[in-house]
Image: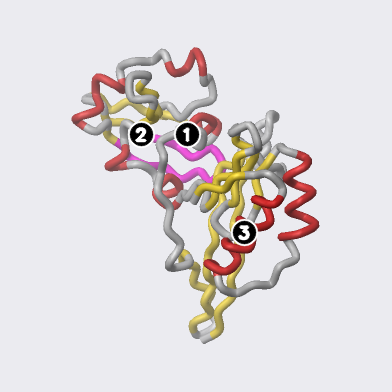
């Protein structure tokens, strides 16, 4: 059996073009996958041992209205959702404990591209998926970042995504990454992370894992 590892990235730009390659808040899906060849047939699976804890910031969901659209309201908070890029259809239902949150539509005045099921609770300052129990597959597979990079003033400068990819709109950070980090061929993830933290700390950045 032969194995290959590669990264799948799905992007969207201002023109709603899924083929546009760009970083930043419109990176809709970034996922390392493993391709196994079994009897000549390619079988795709996710890479094991990559952990991710959601901070409920809501950034990923704030643009998923470009991906997920409601095509049928079946009543009783039950909906049929279409993925505008893949055509995949998913039956979802609002979680019973999130119905009151779902009925609050104020999110769309601030985040007009938000997923139709995303809501933000201003009291707790956390975002919520109101169909979390039945959410689409792309949402289940999503992992936002492995390292959060803060600039000297404490403002977010970028993120290291699942498989050593930098998402940043900070030109200085991008140059540092390209010059000092991107070339590193360190197979051990923990050692790679430690090296990145040391490099960025010397340049005045703070890294959170």
Q: Secondary structure at mark 3?
A: loop
At x 55%, y 45%, the residue is 148
The residue that mark 3 highlights is 164
Tell me which corner region of the image, top left, top right, bottom left or bottom right, holds residue 105.
top left
The coloring applied to the image is secondary structure
Q: Nearer the viewer, mark 2 or mark 3?
A: 3
Secondary element type, mark 1: helix
Tell me the residue that label 2 is attached to: 129
Q: Is residue 98 above or below residue 103?
A: below
Asked if the stretch drawn in magenta spans residue 83, the answer is yes
Dot 3 crowding, Cα within 10 Å, few <14, some 14–19, many 20+: some
Q: Which residue is mark 1?
A: 61
In the picture, measured across the screen, residue 195 lies left or right of residue 86, that is right
Where is residue 180 drawn, in percent x and y?
76, 59
Highlighted range, magenta = 80-92
Q: Nearer the viewer, residue 160 or 112?
A: 160
Above or below, 84 against 36 in this view is above
Query: What separation in Å lies between label 3 and label 1 (alpha carbons)?
Result: 22 Å
Residues at discs 2 and 1 in contact (Cβ within 8 Å)? yes
Asked whether residue 189 appears in the rendered view, the answer is: yes
* Label 3 vs 1, first from the N-terminus: 1
**Viewer-side residue, 35 vs 106:** 106
Lateral position of residue 92 relative to residue 5, left or right = left
Q: Where's residue 127, x and y in %?
A: 39, 30
Q: Residue at x 35, y 41 (%)?
A: 135
* Res 117 visible: no
């Amino acid at each position: 059996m032969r194995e290959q590892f590669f990264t799948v990235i799905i992007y969207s730009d201002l023109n709603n073009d899924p083929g546009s390659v760009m970083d930043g808040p419109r990176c809709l899906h970034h996922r390392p996958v493993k391709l196994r060849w079994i009897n000549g047939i390619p079988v795709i699976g996710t890479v094991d041992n990559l952990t991710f804890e959601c901070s409920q910031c809501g950034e990923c969901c704030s643009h998923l209205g470009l991906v997920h659209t409601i095509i049928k309201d079946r009543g009783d908070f039950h909906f049929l959702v279409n993925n505008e890029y893949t055509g995949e259809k998913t039956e979802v239902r609002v979680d019973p404990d999130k119905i009151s949150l779902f009925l609050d539509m104020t999110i769309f005045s601030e985040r007009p591209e938000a997923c139709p099921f995303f809501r933000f609770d201003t009291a707790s300052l956390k975002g919520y998926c109101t169909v979390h129990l039945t959410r689409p597959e792309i949402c289940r597979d999503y992992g936002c970042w492995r390292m959060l990079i803060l600039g000297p003033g404490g403002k977010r400068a970028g993120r290291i995504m699942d498989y050593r990819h930098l998402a940043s709109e900070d030109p200085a950070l991008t140059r540092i990454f390209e010059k000092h980090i991107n070339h590193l061929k360190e197979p051990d993830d923990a050692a790679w992370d430690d090296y990145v933290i040391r490099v960025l700390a010397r340049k005045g950045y703070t890294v959170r894992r």
